[in-house]
Image (cartoon, rainbow, N blue to C red):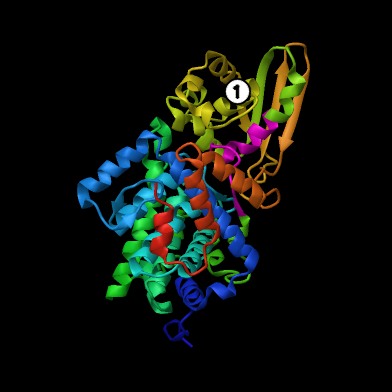
């Protein structure tokens, strides 16, 4: 047999397309669906909280300047926008405070793109919350697997995997809702591959582009599904091809493309998605917990030096450039500053949204202590399987305190319970809405899958 006569091999996109087209809500285990509802609850609460921040108003003005008002409700706001614009804004609101969930091995914020895409598609199609919940789960499963395929390398070369992987999950979610068959969902993935992007250059100056990434991924997924439904074609080997995702974005690096089609319907990656206990980059959570553990042992003794060991890939995100990490220019800089978070946690004994307010960022004691943070490579880090953190504090009395968090809290090995997620939701939504609204939203979200019209669900989650 010559090479040209070799039988065709099923592509990864086709494997995903077949899985997404045949899967029904009844195929998904009950515990997965229950966790999915709580992940959605976390996301919606964060969307409400984001409405009190300036970036939400800027995003709304930018979107209405192009498309004007529409029919789709927006999470946490009274406004209505066209479907794709609503998806963009919902993604911005969910991810804007960087307090949303993260699939740890994929290093991807999975809900922030999958939920806006599934919601916009479901409302536009006039379907119900059974279809909405199914589409959301499928979007999470695909986004996570695409991120896993990068083997932790996307950040290292300057791509934000939430933007890259999220676009594929969004395309699958939107394609399933819009009634595409396996071939159509396959094509939607091929099309969206030309739209998946997201640069990490915001780290250099604290600009707002990262906040836009998941919403843009959701919009790209909706667009790709629409083009596929209209008859547009897309490359079959969008993942593994010569100029596919992994050979372009991660050329020459170790990747795991086969992860995209592995374990579909058997291993539910949604259950490995971590809910954040802190409103900061997930890479720093273990350091915050380590600092809290050591804090009671310090007493009144002065701190001479703080040494933090971290894997070099996440270090690029939360330790560079040093000047912006020692003295964050704004709250977004602060979220991605290991020195600021460790210093704040040691001095204040907590890290909440309040620690990102302007007066906290100007706290001279915190900034002085942040200057004492030294960073080194961590040869024992579990990254990307978990986000490890080791802290060593040298005290003026000669003592040296050490603590290591090998697996970050919120990880699948140390997950937040559903009840803790509800508590977090009440805290975040409470920053922007009264208890009556919180009760209404909580009931709607935890009832997902009850066949309520998706439009009614969206109305219940309006501000």
The location of residue 447, given as percent across then percent down, is 54, 61
Residue 369 placement: quadrant: top right
> Does residue 107 sit above or below 177 in this rendering?
above
Marker count (numbered): 1
> Does residue 28 sit above or below 118 in this rendering?
below
Task: Left or right? Give the position of 333 relative to 339.
Answer: left
Q: Is residue 27 magenta?
A: no
Residue 210 placement: quadrant: top left
Instruction: Please name the residue shown 42% across and 24% down the image.
Output: 329
The location of residue 461, given as percent across then percent down, is 43, 52
Residue 57 placement: quadrant: top left
Can residue 8 be seen here?
yes
Can residue 236 be seen here?
no
Task: Left or right? Give the position of 264 relative to 10.
Answer: right
Comparing 3 with 366, the one in front is: 366
Comparing 370 with 62, the one in front is: 62
Magenta part of the chain: 273-291
Instruction: Please name the residue shown 53% across and 18% down the image.
Output: 367
Packing grade of label 1 (10 A; few <14, some 14-19, many >=20) is: many
> Does residue 96 sit above or below 366 in this rendering?
below
The location of residue 90, given as percent across then percent down, is 39, 50
The residue singled out by tag 1 in the image is 343
Instruction: Please name the residue shown 62% across and 59% down the image.
Output: 271
Q: Is residue 289 magenta?
A: yes
Comparing 34 with 460, the one in front is: 460
Callout 1: helix, strand or loop?
helix
> Does residue 83 sit above or below 277 in this rendering?
below
Instruction: Please name the residue shown 55% across and 45% down the image.
Output: 425
């Amino acid at each position: 047999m010559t090479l040209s006569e070799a039988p065709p091999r099923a592509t990864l996109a086709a494997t995903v397309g077949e899985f997404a087209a045949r899967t029904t809500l009844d195929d998904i285990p009950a515990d997965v669906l229950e966790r999915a509802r709580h992940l959605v609850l976390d996301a919606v609460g964060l969307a409400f909280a984001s409405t009190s921040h300036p970036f939400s108003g800027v995003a709304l003005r930018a979107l209405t300047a192009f498309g004007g008002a529409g029919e789709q409700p927006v999470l946490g706001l009274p406004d209505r926008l066209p479907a794709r614009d609503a998806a963009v804004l919902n993604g911005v609101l969910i991810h804007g405070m960087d307090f949303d969930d993260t699939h740890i091995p994929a290093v991807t914020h999975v809900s922030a793109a999958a939920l806006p895409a599934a919601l916009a598609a479901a409302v536009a199609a006039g379907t119900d919350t059974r279809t909405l919940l199914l589409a959301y789960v499928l979007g999470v499963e695909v986004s996570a697997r695409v991120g896993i395929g990068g083997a932790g390398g996307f950040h290292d070369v300057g791509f934000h995997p939430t933007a890259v992987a999220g676009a594929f999950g969004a395309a699958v979610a939107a394609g399933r809702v819009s009634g595409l068959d396996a071939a159509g969902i396959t094509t939607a993935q091929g099309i969206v591959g030309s739209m998946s992007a997201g640069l990490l250059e915001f780290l250099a100056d604290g600009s707002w582009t990262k906040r836009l990434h998941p919403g843009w991924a959701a919009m790209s997924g909706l667009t790709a599904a629409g083009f596929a439904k209209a008859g547009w074609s897309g490359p079959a080997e969008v993942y593994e091809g010569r100029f596919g995702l992994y050979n372009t974005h991660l050329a020459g690096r170790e990747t795991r493309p086969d992860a995209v089609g592995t374990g579909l319907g058997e291993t539910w990656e949604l259950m490995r998605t971590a809910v954040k206990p802190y409103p900061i980059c997930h890479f720093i959570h273990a350091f915050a917990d380590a600092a809290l553990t050591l804090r009671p042992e310090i007493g009144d003794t002065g701190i001479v030096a703080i040494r933090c060991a971290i894997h070099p890939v996440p270090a690029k995100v939360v330790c560079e450039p040093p000047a912006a990490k020692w003295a964050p220019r704004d709250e977004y800089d602060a979220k991605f500053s290991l020195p600021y978070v460790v210093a704040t946690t040691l001095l204040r004994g907590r890290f909440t949204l309040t620690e990102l307010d302007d007066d906290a960022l100007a706290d001279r004691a915190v900034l002085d202590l942040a200057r004492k943070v030294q960073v080194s490579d961590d040869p024992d880090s579990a990254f990307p399987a978990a986000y490890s953190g080791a802290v060593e504090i040298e005290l003026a009395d000669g003592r040296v305190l050490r603590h290591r968090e090998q697996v970050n809290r919120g990880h699948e090995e140390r997950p937040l319970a559903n009840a803790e997620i509800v508590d977090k939701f009440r805290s975040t939504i409470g920053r922007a809405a009264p208890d009556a609204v919180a009760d209404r939203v909580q009931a709607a979200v935890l009832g997902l899958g009850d066949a309520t019209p998706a439009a009614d669900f969206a109305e219940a989650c309006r501000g």
